[in-house]
Image: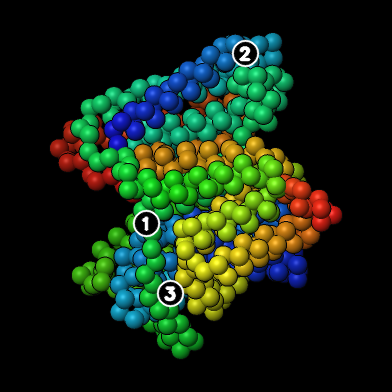
Amino acid sequence: MGLENLAHGFHLAITPFNVFMAVVGILLGTVIGVLPGLGGANGVAILLPLTFTMPPTSAIILLTSLYWGALFGGAITSILFNIPGEPWSVATTFDGYPMARQGRSGQALTAAFTSSFVGAFFSIVLITFFAPILAEVALKFGPPEFFAIQLLTFSSFVGLGGGNPLKSLVSILIGFILAAIGLDIVTGQLRMTFGFTDLMKGFDFIVAVIGLFGIGEILLSVEEGLTFKGTRTGMNLRVVLDTWKVLPRYYRTFVRGSFIGFWMGFKPGGATPASFMSYAFAKRFSKHPERFGKGEIEGVIAPETAAHAAGVAAMLPMLTLGIPGSPTAAVMLGGLIIWGLQPGPMLFVDKPDFVWGLIASMYTGNILGVIMVLAGVPFFAAILRIPFAILTPLIVVVCAIGAYAVHSSMIDIWYMLIFGVVGYVFKKLDYPLAPLVLALVLGDLAENALRQSLIMSQGSLAIFFTRPIAGAITLVAIFFFALPVITPWWRRLRGVPAAAPAPRET
Amino acid sequence: MRIADLLTAVILALGGGLVVYDSVRLGIGWGSDGPRSGFFPFWLAVIMIVACVAIMLQALRRTPTELFLTRERLGPVLKVLWPATAAVVLMQFVGLYVASAVYMGFYIRWVGRHRWVTVIGLAVAIPVVTFIVFEQWFLVPMPKGPLETWLGY
């Protein structure tokens, strides 16, 4: 049944208009991935208002293609400029930049794009087969199960996200509280507006994403006095073909990276740890671990495969459960709601065209993407030679346009500026932004699930424990929430010294 | 860094207090048809206040290390922030296109010290391109002012 649907999906994905959308999306996405201050999440957020009038399938193809483009773009800046555009490209700089310094940037870029493609492809194949099964299972879920999954999502930020768990928790709560502000659609009462009519509409997550990630990121990068000292690209067909000849030798690294990426990626915040883990494994199993960090091609393959596999895998829970695995997926989920689609397993039943068109477009989008970035590297690298004094106001203007376009309201541009300053301060103080955005997007859904569950149980919280599936998920969630407390205690018990804190996702 | 950390936690806790106050007004218990409006925000805010107090205690126990911001580092940040704020103020009166032309021109000249040709070229070209893309192609209206009215839009 799956293959038949997929064939139908391809039928939709390769219409001229949808292919055109994919090309535009990849192009814009790569530019956005290369530019400092603009990443996948706020690129999607800025473009979202332009898709309101499009057919949903074309709109999602545009936005997902932008996401693939941004994932590819991150590798360009990491290798050529030693600046990771996204947190999951940090590990790519370890060997990518030394390779570029040795004049092997063409090889490094080819390896990075090819491994991104392999990782992505692996995840897409798994999504093709697992998504319908997972959706089938999820169809039997009621409100308690969905609320338990929400708990699990957020608990993994606290327990596995790295950084300060208390601050992760506070970020999540801020997101939920912001989502609650304004009109409560269930009771019709106004919440936390304190008489201000402007607050009635509440805070839109698109505006928050643009402010937190867009403006906040610019402020952070000017403070750090970012300058670009790039190396030459040195890309041509010969280099690409020569690199492709050596790549099959590293098939083990590809397979390992793909599995790590997929496994980590369908849980939220998985791409960054996946890339580091894959790098560490590649080094451990290598015959020449001493070459890592000095320009070993395997050190580029490993993190890129895993990061891209994880980035794609983040789409799986978004499609089947309505729970996004990354901030970018969260913005897309918000898009689904705006287009009038109900995210979650019912999508597979009600809108098979949309779902399978999207899955098929993941194949075509990534194939188009790898060809476009391989051919376009000199062009994309040239973008970074634009002086900072021109890029900065341009990005601010683009962000303002994106924020205004959501509701055509001036106040949203002010919110964007305020969110920008908040994002800057939060990033400096190590409050993670990704869970805040996820909570803001999921706030209403989570509250409704909680309300309905409590109505089912006449107000007893026991309902989250007595139903078998909900109970199991809730217990895992509680375990993750408790993990920051358990870990030091467990270590002390066994006499193991505390480990270095894990790198933080966004 | 420690003071900034403490201050942020205090502000967030106060915000939480505000939410608790309003939630209690709305009712945090059980209504005729399920939990009342204040139920969910109330518990969120209570947990947030507890977490903020814990963050404050953490920060107090730590010895102060590096500064949150030095004067030299604050400079460039403000240099981005105040022109952007001014541009948003300007937008209310002259619309987005004129405001972004003035803002971009000012910033490129003042921070970048580019030649006037570059400054004026970009300050005119970028708003014009945005206008064509948003107003003509995608039909997404942006805030407009007297100039656009005069031009007949």
Q: Quadrant of the N terminus of chain A?
A: bottom right
Tell me if mark 3 has few (under 14), some (14-19) or many (20+) residues whose alpha carbon lies within 10 angstroms of its own: many
Residue that carries the numbered disc 2 in the rendered image:
B26
The image quadrant that residue A297 belongs to is bottom left
Q: Secondary structure at mark 1?
A: loop
Q: Residues within 10 Å of mark 2 (few under 14, many from 20)?
A: some
**Number of numbered discs present?**
3
- Judging from the image, what secondary structure is the residue with disc 2 in? helix
Q: CA distance from mark 2 to mark 3?
A: 57 Å
Give the foreground label among 1 and 2: 1
- Return the x and y of residue A85 as percentages of the image width and height: 44, 60
In depth, the one of A271 and A27 nearer the eye is A27
Q: Which residue shows up at 24% across the image and 46% down it?
A: A500
Question: Which residue is identified by label 3?
Answer: A109
Element at label 3: helix
Q: Amino acid at mark 2?
A: Leu
**What residue sits right under mark 1 in the picture?**
A225
